[in-house]
Amino acid sequence: MREALRRAFRASDNRKMVEALYRFLCEAWGISPGLGFLMPAGYEQAHASYDPDNGSIHLNPTLLAGSRVACAYYFLHEMRHAQQYLRPQDFPPEVTRGLSYVVQYDGKCFKRDSDGWKSCQLEGPEAYFTELYLAQPHELDAGDFAYETVRSLADAREAEELEALYHFWQPAYQVIRTAEMPMALDAVYRRIDAAIITP
């Protein structure tokens, strides 16, 4: 497995690398999300995204011309999200619970149900919502998977870049302490539920 990933990671350009990693992981995990290199409307500035409604991963085309490490990291992060949504049985409940929620830094939040996504606006500081977003178990899992996979393939120079990228996306736990985060996440999910049920 590692040798196949290594060959994919060392492809001649970033697009070929992503496509090789994609094929390998689709076969290994038994999933087949879509894969595109244009960001959907409203997400043009994002590095990458996974859309559970159409089952597709989107990568910003700027990644294809940039760093191999960043391109692989962001792709693998979103590929892990695809696995979380498409094979929830592979993950513990604390990871899959948050897949029905979106928490944004400005307090704009969403919940997905059988009728689609419903939104609400919660009050609170940006640092609070940013920390909640970063500390959600499905985000931590996706970040850890991307980091550990790239770390196993990177050379020493690439490893330095990877460390900086990984730590940038880790919660600082300055607003909410680590031990308090599960309760804080539970509370914000309940706030979203209440705001959507009784707007």
Image (spheres, rainbow, N blue to C red):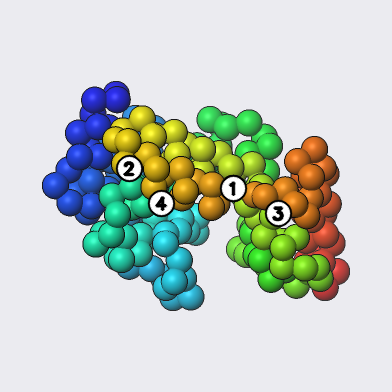
| Residue type, label 1 | Gln
For residue 191, say whether it is visible. yes
Looking at the image, tell me whether mark 1 or mark 4 is earlier in sequence order.
4
Q: Earlier in the sequence, mark 2 or mark 4?
A: 4
Q: Residue pushed farthest bottom?
A: 41
> Where does residue 130 sit, x and y in percent of width and height?
67, 60
37, 158: nearer the viewer:
158
Outermost residue on the left side: it is 12
Measuring from the top left, give residue 64's x and y in whole percent. Answer: 26, 59
Mark 2, secondary structure of its residue: helix
Going by the numbered disc 4, the residue's amino acid type is Tyr
**Residue situated in front as seen by the camera: 29 or 169:** 169
Q: Are marks 1 and 3 in contact (CB under 8 Å)?
A: no
183 left or right of 115 in image: right
Q: Which quadrant, please, contains the C terminus?
A: bottom right
The mark nearer the N terminus, 1 or 3, is 3
Q: Which residue is mark 4?
A: 74
Distance, label 1 to label 3, CA atoms, is 11 Å
- The answer to which of marks 1 and 2 sits earlier in the sequence is 2
Query: Residue under circle 1?
Result: 170
Residue at 17% x, 51% y: name it. Answer: 13
Mark 2: few/some/many CA within 10 Å (<14, 14-19, 20+): some
In this orientation, which residue lies closer to the viewer: 163 or 196? Answer: 163
* Three-letter code for the amino acid on which mark 2 is drawn: Glu
Which disc number belongs to residue 56?
none
Alpha carbons under labels 3 and 4: distance apart: 20 Å
The residue beneath circle 3 is 132
Residue that numbered label 2 is attached to: 158
Kindly identify the residue that appears in the image at 27 percent across and 32 percent down. 5
Cα gap from disc 2 to disc 4, whole angstroms: 15 Å
> In the rendered picture of this protein, how many numbered marks are placed on residues?
4
